[in-house]
Amino acid sequence: MKVGLFIPCYIDQFYPQVGIATLRLLQRLNVDVTFPMEQTCCGQPMANSGFQKLAAGCDRNFIRNFADCDAVVGPSGSCVLHLKEHLHDEQHPTEAAHLRNNVYELCEFLTDVLKVEQLPPVRFPYRVGLHTSCHGQRGLGLSSASELMKPKFSKPEQLLNMVDGLELISLAHPDECCGFGGTFCVFEEALSAKMGKDRVADHLRHGAEVITGGDMSCLMQLEGTLRRQRSNVRVMHIAEILTADA
C-alpha cells in the first residue's frame, strides 16, 4: 500500500513537530509513506466561510498530488472530514471519488486499516486528558457520543491505552466542544473563548498534566487558553505521544 501523508497547512506552519511525529509513527509501523511536496490547504477555510467555489484550486491541487496513492492519511480530523465530504473536480471525477473514499484521519487509519493491536515500545508516564473533537466524533465516527444509548468506544483511547505508563483521566464532559470551530472563533470570539475556558477547566479539575487529541486545531484553541492562564499543562497531538520514545 502506497500511503500519501497529508499535512494540513496550519500544522505545517505552526506545529511541524506534529507532521514529523505522524511520519515517524507510520514508518515505525512499516507503512510505505510518500510526502508530495506541492500539497497545501485542503480548502476548508473557504468552504466554512461560504465560498466553496473558491476552493476549486485546492481540490485540483490535492488530486494532482495524491491521485496515485492507495490511501491518504492526515493528523487532522476536520481537514480529513472536509476532504471526505467536499473533494470534487469535474475534470477528474474518478480520481476525486477514489480519494474521498480513501482519505483517513490518523487514528482511524491505525485502528481500521492497519488494525494496530500493539505499538512499537513507547512510554509516556503522565496523566493525560483526551479532548474529543467534534469533527472526529460526529463526522468521522472516531468515538461514540455520550448522549446516545449505544455501546461506548473511542479509537484514540484504544491507541492511548497501548502506551506504557500513560494514565488516561476521566472527564465530566468527555465530548464537549472546545469552541474553536474554524472561523467560528473569529466571528464569535467571546463565546469561543468561554467555551475554551470551560473545556480546559474540566481537564484541570481532573488533574491532567497533558491534554491530547487528534485535531491540532482544537488543541491550538486549548493551548491558547492554557497560555493565557499561565498554566504548566502541556498540549500534545496524539501522534507525539504515540512516538514519545521515537
Image: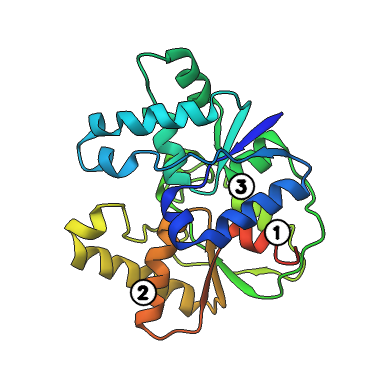
Instruction: Residue 182 in the image: state x and y as whole percent.
Output: 31, 52
Which residue is disc 3 drawn over? 155
150 vs 89, left or right, is right
* Mark 2 or mark 1: whose residue is earlier in sequence: 1
Q: CA distance from mark 2 to mark 3?
A: 26 Å
Q: CA distance from mark 3 to mark 1?
A: 10 Å
Q: Which mark is residue 176?
A: none
Tell me the amino acid under the disc marked 2. Thr
**In the depicted structure, whether residue 71 falls above or below residue 139:** above
Q: CA distance from mark 2 to mark 1?
A: 27 Å
Q: Label 1 neighbourhood size at 10 Å, few (<14), some (14-19), many (20+)? A: few
Which residue is disc 1 drawn over? 161
- Determine if residue 215 is in view: yes
Q: What kind of element bears circle 2?
A: helix
Q: Which mark is residue 225?
A: 2
Residue at the front extreme, as displayed: 38
* Of labels 2 and 3, the one closer to you: 2
The quarter of the picture where residue 242 lies is: bottom right
Q: What kind of element bears circle 3?
A: helix
- Determine if residue 170 is in view: no
